[in-house]
Amino acid sequence: KDVVEALVDFMQKLGPGSIQNTPNWGWNSSSDPCMNHWYGVRCDNNNQTVKSIVLEQINLSGTVDFESVCKETNLLLLSLKFNNLTGTLSQEISNCKRLRLLYLNGNHFSGDLPNSLTTLANLVRIDVSSNELSGNLPDLSRNTGLLTFLAQNNRLTGQLPNFNYNQLQYFDVSNNDLSGVVPDETGHFGAKSFAGNPRLCGKELSKACPSKKKHKSLHDLLIYSAFAILGLIILVLVALIFLKKRQNLEHTKIGTKSTKEEGVKSTENDGVTSDSKIGQSRSEFSITSAENGGVSASLVVLSSPVEAVNGLRFEDLLRAQAELIGRGKHGSLYKVLPDVGVPLAVKRIKDWEISRDEFKKRMQRIDQVKHPNVLPIVAYYSSKQEKLLVYEFQQNGNLFNLLQGSQIGKIFDWGSRLNIACNTAEALAFMHTELKDDQIAHGNLKSSNILLTKDMNSYISEYGLMVVDNGSQDSNIFNLDVCAFGVLLLELLTGKPVQSNGLDLAKWVNSVVKEEWTGEVFDKALVVEGASEERMVGLLQIALKCINGSPDLRPGMDQVATMIVSLKEEDERSMASSDP
Ligand SMILES: Nc1ncnc2c1ncn2[C@@H]1O[C@H](COP(=O)(O)OP(=O)(O)OP(=O)(O)O)[C@@H](O)[C@H]1O
């Protein structure tokens, strides 16, 4: 009741004039905004709360009473654009805590943009362009989900606050009276977004900023000297680090003879035993496996599809040049260039608490199950302290990098994304089925473990390298892969790669979808490309099933794969039928 009265007050102050004679106008305290379908009002599915108020271009000529309208705390969208509204925008706007979209453009609002806007954590789009607003802009970099900020054609003054330019999709502050420097990192927003502010300068506007004349006082001199000394210290440190790195790099040339050489027996997989002298370098990158000696120092070469790896011996690995290319939570990854053969990726896992027999059995099972989209292990080595897994090195990077690239404008189109989703789902489903009895899941599925081929095909790498600790949950370990795959789908759809477990991304997507603003989730690049919204929503629905908070309600990977395959087929059919 209070809310209804507050909304009626809000409308009265808006000065509706003759428009209120419109049939079914509503907006009176004897009716209900949802049940009686007030003009411009939309409610949630249960007709309980007002979700959006859209009163555009209807000659409203009064003021906005945010205190009243924000009594409806569930409001997500307020659009009053293209009216004749006047007055200031009050701080009470922050009472609309869930507001996502605010369109006030094309009116005569004056005064400052309220600072309290920065407390609206859900704001996605603000358009206050073409008003008479003045004063400084609030620091909207705190609104981390903001995609649109349009404030052109006003009288705004002061310096530009920080904005997350990399994230913004639309940005314009042209034709105001802003001053100071336009930062260099404004991404894809060029001069047009800042033009018409005579006191703005910077590279973006091809207008150099005047350099401040400095009076060299004793104080300045002291500061300069302090900086110079600091600079010198940094230089020396950098040089030291460089030297240390060089030393380490030499150590990583595994097999470099050190003064402390030791004879070690190395057994090849064909059973031939050979003596070799292997240096024990104790640097942190060195492979210390040799100290275990005997049988443990053997490299088991699996039935590799790569001809060049078939003759690989442990000494070859030790002797080869190695470069550390990543250090993950579970181990380090080296690019190794043997004297003969193809470049290899050697994953080194330390302190994996698994018995030698269990490890061997695990590797052999994984080797028996082959899928064209799962990168095969070509060889492995096991000692008590560490395990080495050898793969063929893939030159074309991983999905994480690809998504990062797409964020800065590199093309990663819908078709390729759907293809990767499909390949990965099918491969994972296959592996799950084949390795169900052995209880071997992937255990660490994430975008940096999806490696790419030149033609946008993908490989799942490092399958089964993590023994999943299922904790107290009674769900099966394969469910965890399904959830991780759901996060992968979210990354593909939103274009936002995640480094950790993806829970934040899942939470964000869930909250947006719950508010029925599904469209906001998708990567802008996909929308611009014209990818079918229907199919994107379809894939999103699959992703949401996969990340279901109750593991037992998640679909199996085979079901997921079936759904994605049919989505892809649908996509291909629609492409074919839209071809000229
Ligand atoms: N066979 C391979 N060829 C080329 N690059 C690879 C290969 N395997 C892994 N990489 C890349 O090497 C980097 C490090 O991989 P690694 O698996 O050690 O780290 P991570 O996946 O970030 O962490 P972790 O798996 O330990 O949680 C990643 O960028 C990964 O994509």
Image: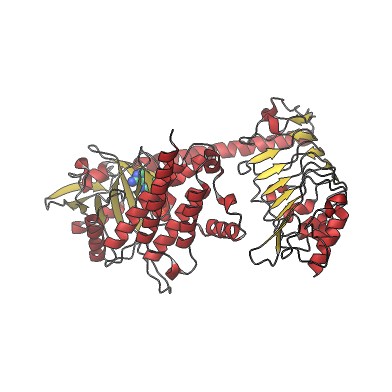
Nearer to us in this view, 28 or 543: 28
Residue 206 in the image: above or below residue 575? above
Which residue is painted at 23% across and 63% down in the image? 361
Q: Is residue 364 left or right of residue 180?
A: left
Which quadrant, please, contains the C terminus? top left
Note whether residue 362 is visible. Answer: yes
Q: Position of residue 342 (x, y in %)?
A: 26, 39
Q: How many marks?
A: 0
Residue 73 in the image: above or below residue 240? below
Residue furthest front as drawn? 23
The quadrant in which residue 337 appears is: top left
Nearer to us in this view, 214 or 390: 390
Which quadrant, please, contains the N terminus? bottom right
Q: Is residue 559 left or right of residue 365?
A: right
Nearer to us in this view, 221 or 150: 150
The quadrant in which residue 367 appears is: bottom left
Note whether residue 334 is visible. Answer: no
Q: Position of residue 29 (x, y in %)?
A: 83, 66
Q: Is residue 139 left or right of residue 574?
A: right
Which residue is painted at 20% across and 53% down in the image? 300
Q: Position of residue 402 (x, y in %)?
A: 45, 42
The color scheme shown is secondary structure
Q: Position of residue 126 (x, y in %)?
A: 72, 47
Nearer to us in this view, 368 or 314: 368
Which residue is painted at 85% across and 46% down in the image? 85
Q: Is residue 244 left or right of residue 508?
A: left
